[in-house]
Image (spheres, helix red, strand yellow):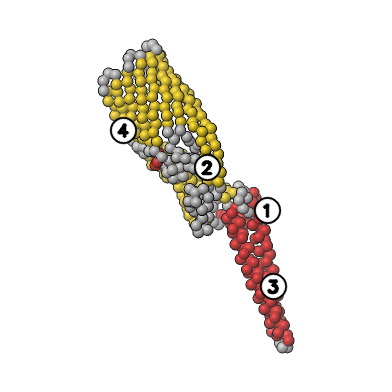
């Protein structure tokens, strides 16, 4: 069994708080330097006055020049501190957002095993096993700086340079590992009479393999760390589904109206792998489902057959508590250092689906 997977992911990041923290640090350093130069200017001025009083004009001139130079540096760094403090108000959450567009693909391989037992002319049982398939999707990531601050005439270049220098390059390699789950199914058919057949299906799927997906970037990045304040990493958690193993049970029947026409109908309950609203993804608002299906088969002749099927899928209403803290609901609750939007939110879903299928078969 060969399986090709292709993905397009978008990973959002909130750069505003990082830029704000950097500006605050710069303001603090500049203010400290301004104070040091101001103190040095005062000391040099006092030494110049003392030398002048002693009649040492050369020393007085030398100390005076040093006082002027230190005072000039104090004014410069005071201006830088004021500028950095002003930048702090321009940065912050929502003002310097960005995202990575990530694309990748991969081929994976697995196998199917099946066994069918005709117990008698009226009853048969089948078992089918489908293996897991491992994928390592490789591609590239393009970091795009979309916040208004990056196009600001005064601060745009400074903000852009600050983000790029911390590892968020315009384009880089990226990869993510994903495993599709294995499943085991048991099927049964009972031929009640020449007109009626009854079918049953029970399927177990190991969805727990889809526990967490890490996106690995080529370059390490400086990111916020709830425990240590900041760290560098090349990995980020893009999906944290924490799925559970599930069961699917279905029953159905077929009725042979006449020689060419057979009608089919059935219902099934499909358990969702989502454990709770805290693990439901907004991009995949999955919930428990009930399938109602109708269909028909018409044998045009011995070589040609037409199948038509319709399914209505009722999907249970669901809620998703979305967070950008890579596993926790806030900066101090179970979160880890990773590239993330650092935002929280919630949403509710009401979903249903309809499937219509038409199949034509020609027998040689």
User: What residue did someone put label 4 on?
Assistant: 113
**Mark nearer the N terminus (2 vs 4):** 4
Residue named by callout 1: 153
Q: Is residue 262 left or right of residue 282?
A: left
Residue position for label 3? 71
- Residue 176 position within the rendered picture, expressed as x and y whole percent measured from the top left: 44, 45
SS at badge 4: strand
- Classed neighbour count for the residue bearing mark 1: other residues with Cα under 10 Å, few (<14), some (14–19), many (≥20): few
State the image quarter where residue 128 is shown. top left
Residue placed farthest to the top in the image? 258
Residue found 63% across the figure and 50% down from its top: 95
155 is higher (above) or lower (below) than 61: above
Question: Which of these two is toward me, 40 or 334?
Answer: 334
> Is 288 placed above or below 216 here?
above
- Cα distance in 3D space between marks 2 and 3: 55 Å
The residue at the point 45 percent across, 33 percent down is: 288
Mark 3 crowd level (few <14, some 14–19, many ≥20, 10 Å Cα): many
Location of the C terminus (image quadrant): top left
* Foreground: disc 1 or disc 2: 2
Circle 2 is placed at which residue position?
321
- Mark 2–mark 3 CB contact (< 8 Å): no
**Comparing marks 2 and 3, which lies closer to the viewer?**
2
Q: How far across and how far down the image is residue 311, in percent?
A: 46, 24
Q: Sequence-wise, which precedes: disc 1 or disc 2? A: 1
Residue at the far left: name it. Answer: 120
């Amino acid at each position: 069994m060969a399986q090709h997977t292709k993905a397009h992911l978008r990973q959002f990041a909130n750069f505003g708080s990082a830029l704000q923290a950097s500006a605050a640090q710069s303001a603090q350093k500049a203010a400290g330097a301004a104070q040091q130069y101001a103190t040095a200017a005062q000391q040099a001025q006092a030494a110049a006055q003392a030398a002048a009083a002693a009649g040492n004009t050369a020393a007085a001139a030398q100390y005076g020049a040093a006082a002027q130079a230190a005072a000039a540096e104090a004014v410069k760094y005071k201006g830088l501190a004021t500028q950095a403090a002003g930048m702090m108000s321009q940065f912050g959450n929502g003002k310097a957002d960005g995202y990575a567009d990530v694309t990748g693909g991969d081929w994976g391989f697995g196998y199917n095993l099946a066994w069918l037992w005709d117990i008698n002319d009226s009853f048969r049982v089948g078992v089918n096993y489908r293996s897991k398939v491992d994928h390592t999707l490789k591609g590239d990531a393009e970091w795009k700086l979309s916040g208004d601050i990056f196009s600001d005439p005064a601060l745009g270049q400074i903000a852009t340079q600050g983000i790029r220098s911390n590892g968020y390059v315009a384009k880089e390699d990226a990869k993510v590992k994903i495993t599709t789950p294995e499943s085991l199914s048991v099927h049964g058919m009972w031929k009640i009479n020449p007109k009626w057949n009854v079918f049953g299906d029970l399927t177990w799927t190991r969805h727990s393999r889809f526990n967490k997906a890490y996106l690995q970037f080529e370059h390490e990045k400086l990111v916020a760390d709830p425990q240590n304040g900041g760290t560098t990493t090349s990995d980020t958690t893009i999906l944290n589904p924490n799925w559970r193993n599930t069961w699917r049970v279905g029953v159905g029947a077929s009725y042979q109206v006449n020689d060419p026409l057979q009608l089919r109908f059935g219902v099934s309950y499909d358990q969702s792998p989502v454990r709770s609203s805290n693990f439901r993804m907004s991009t995949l608002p999955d919930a428990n489902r009930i399938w109602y299906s109708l269909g028909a088969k018409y044998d045009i002749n011995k070589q040609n057959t037409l199948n038509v099927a319709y399914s209505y899928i009722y999907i249970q209403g669901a809620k998703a508590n979305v967070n950008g803290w890579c596993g926790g609901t806030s900066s101090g609750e179970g979160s880890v250092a990773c590239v993330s939007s650092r935002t929280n939110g919630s949403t509710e879903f009401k979903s249903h689906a309809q499937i219509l299928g038409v199949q034509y078969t020609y027998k040689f």
